Amino acid sequence: MTLPRKRIAAWPALALGLWLALAAGPARAGLFDDDEARKAIVDLRNRVTALENQNKAQADAAAASAEQLSALRRSVLDLSNQLEDLRSQLATLRGDKEQLARDLSDLQRKQQDTTQAFDDRLRKLEPTKVSVDGRDFTVSPDEKRAYDDAIAAIRGGDFDKSASLLTAFQAAYPASGYADSVRFWLGNALYGKRDYKGAIAAFRAYVAAAPDSPHAPDALLAMANSQAEMKDTKAARRTLAELLKTYPQSDAARAAKERLGSLR
C-alpha cells in the first residue's frame, strides 16, 4: 500500500517523539527494561528507515516515470512533426505530379499539332497520281491545282480566264503530264473567245502531239469549224477530209460528213 508523502515524511518526527517519551522519566522507564527499550527503538528506526527507503524508491520511480512520460511526449511530438512534414512533402509531390501531367499533356498536344502541320506541308509537296484521257501520271499539288483552276474556268464559261490560266500553265509546267490535255482545252478556250487563229494552232499542236487521244477527232472537227469561221472553206474541207480518213469510225467523223455538205 502506498502512503501519502506527508504521512511518510512525518515518521522521523514521530519516532523521535516516542524515543523522548520513553527516555523521559522513571515513571515510564518502569514499563520497559533497557533491552526491550533498545529493541523497540531499533525496530522503530528500522521501520522508519524502510518507510523512508520505500518512499524514496517510489519518488525515484515516479520521477523516472515522469521522465519517461516526458520523453514519450517528446517522441510523439517529434513523430507528429515528421508526419506533418511528410504530408507537406506528399502534397508537394502530388502538385508536382499534376503539373508534370499537365506539362506532358501540353507537350503531346504540341507534338501532335507539329506533326499534323508537318504532314499537311508534306502532303502539299507530295506528288499526286491523276488519270486524264486514260493516262495515269503524277503531278505536284501546285500543278494539279493550276490545271483544275483552268478547267473550272472554262467549264464556267469564263474563256478569257481559262485561256490565260492554260497559257500560264504551259509556261510553268512545259513537261507536265497534263500537257496534251492543256493544248486541247486551250484550243476550246480560244475558240470560245473567238480567237480562231489561236484555236487552230492549239488544236493542230494537240493532234500532232497526241494522235491516239480520244479527243483527237474532236480537235480536228473544232479546227475545221475555226477555219470555217475565218471563211477559209478550203482549209476547213481539207481538215474534215483528214478527220474522215484518220478517224472514220468516230462520232466526230459522222459530224464531219454533215459539215462537208454544208460547206460551199
Image (tube, grey):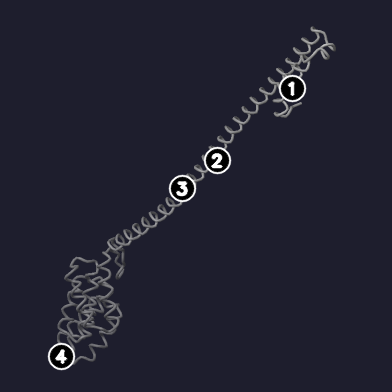
Q: CA distance from mark 4 to mark 1?
A: 162 Å
Q: In the drawing, does residue 53 fall left or right of residue 251?
A: right
In-front residue for pair 257/202: 202
Q: Is residue 73 above or below residue 9?
A: below
Q: CA distance from mark 4 to mark 3?
A: 94 Å
Q: Which residue is label 4 attached to?
A: 231
Q: Residue at x 24, y 66 (%)?
A: 177
Which class describes the residues within 10 Å of circle 2: few (<14), some (14-19), or many (20+)? few
Which class describes the residues within 10 Å of circle 1: few (<14), some (14-19), or many (20+)? few
Front tag of 2 and 4: 2
Q: Which residue is label 3 attached to?
A: 92
Q: Which residue is label 1 attached to?
A: 14
Q: CA distance from mark 1 to mark 2?
A: 51 Å
Amino acid type for the residue under numbered disc 2: Ser
Marker disc for residue 80: 2
Amino acid type for the residue under numbered disc 3: Thr
Front tag of 1 and 3: 1
Dot 4 or dot 3, earlier in sequence: 3
* The quarter of the displayed image where residue 239 is located: bottom left
